[in-house]
Amino acid sequence: MRILISSLPAFILSISFCIAQGGFRVVPLGVKGGGEDGNLSAYMVAPVKSNAFVCLDAGTVTNGIAKAVANKVFPVPADVVLRQYIKAYLISHPHLDHLSGMVINSVEDTAKNIYGTEYCIETLKKHYFNWQSWPNLANEGASPALKKYSYKMLGEDQEVNVEQTEMVVKIFRLSHSSPYESTAFLIRKGESYVLYFGDTGPDEVEKSDKMATVWKAIAPLVKAKQLAGIFLEVSYPNNQQDRQLYGHLTPKWFMKELNVLAENAGAESLRGLNVVVTHMKSGGDNVQKIKAELAAENTLRLNLIFPEQGKAFELK
C-alpha cells in the first residue's frame, strides 16, 4: 500500500504532463483573402513542442516567416524555417492566393511533399510547375521534372501519415463555387485533432451536402473534446449577396454552418470551441464589419480567434 500511495503523485504528474502536451502550435504566415499579396492564406501547424510543421495552404510564405522571426516565434533565421521547419505543404485548392508563396519560393526550398486532391495536383502540374509558368520543381509533369517536391495524392475515407511529422491527415471535399472544389484537412496527432477548411461556400448556396458531411464526421470529436480547433473562412460581411459569394462565407453563413455542427454534436459541446476565422478580404471597413457581425451572431459562445500574421498561438 505504501508503494501505491507513494507512486500516486508521480502517476498524476505523468498524466498531467501528457494532457498538457496535447494540442497544436499555429504560426500564421498569411491570414487574408483577396489581393493582399504579402499576407495570403498560409498556416504552419505542428503538435505543441514540435518544430516539424505542415503548411496548410501557402499563399504567402517567406514574408510571413520573416514577421514570425521578428516576433521571436522562431530562434533561427527565416531561411532555416522555410527549409527545415516546414516539412510538407497541404494545399486545399489551386487558386493563387493559396499556393503562390510555395511556387515562388520553391527554388530556395528543400525537398518535401505536396499533399492534395487529384484536382489540385493535376492543376499544379498543368498550370504552375510546367516550365511555362514556373520551372517544374516536382516529381511529375513537364520534362525535365527536377524532383524537389513530390506529389502525394489524397483520397477521401483514408488517413495518411504526413511524412517527417508526427501527424496524419484525412480529407473532405468541399464545394468552392460549384463545379470547382476545395478541401478540408482533418489533422490528427495522437488523440488530438484540428480541422482546416480551405475556401468553401455554404451548402444551401452551393446546392451541396459537403459541409454537412464534414460536420457529421467530426461531431463525435467535438463531443469528446478531442477537437482542438477549427479554421473556417469568412470572406465578406453580411451585405454581400448570395449570388456574389463565389464559393465563400459571410458571418451569417459561417454561423448557420456551425449551427449544423451543433445539431450533430449538441450546442453545449461547442461552447468555448476554438474557431480560427480565416480569409477575411480587406477593403473599406469589411474586416471591422465581419468581426462585429460574428460577435453579434455568436449565440453558440464559440471562442473566435482572429489570427495575425507572424504571431503564434496554441489550440488546445
Image (cartoon, helix red, strand yellow):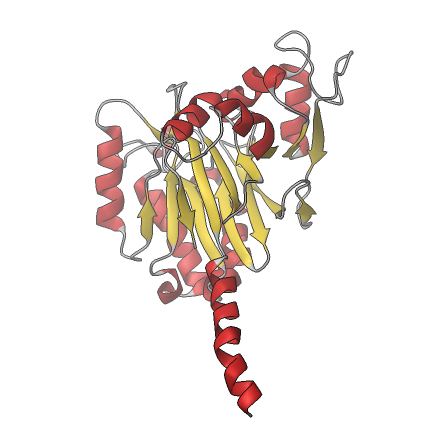
- Tell me, yes or no, if residue 208 can be seen here: no
- Tell me, yes or no, if residue 289 can be seen here: yes
Q: Quadrant of residue 118?
A: top right
Find the residue positioned furthest to the top: 132
Give the x, y percent position of residue 106. 60, 19
Q: Residue at x 45, y 64 (%)?
A: 265
Q: Residue at x 57, y 38 (%)?
A: 54
Q: Specify whether 56 is left or right of 272.
A: right
Q: Nearer the viewer, residue 261 or 47?
A: 47
State whether residue 311 is above or below residue 121: below
Find the residue positioned furthest to the bottom: 1
State whether residue 74 is above or below residue 210: above
Number of numbered discs present? 0
Give the x, y percent position of residue 112. 67, 30
Q: Tell me the quarter of the image containing the C terminus.
A: bottom left
Q: Specify whether 186 is left or right of 289.
A: right
Q: Quadrant of residue 129?
A: top right
Q: Residue at x 52, y 63 (%)?
A: 18
State whether residue 119 is above or below residue 195: above
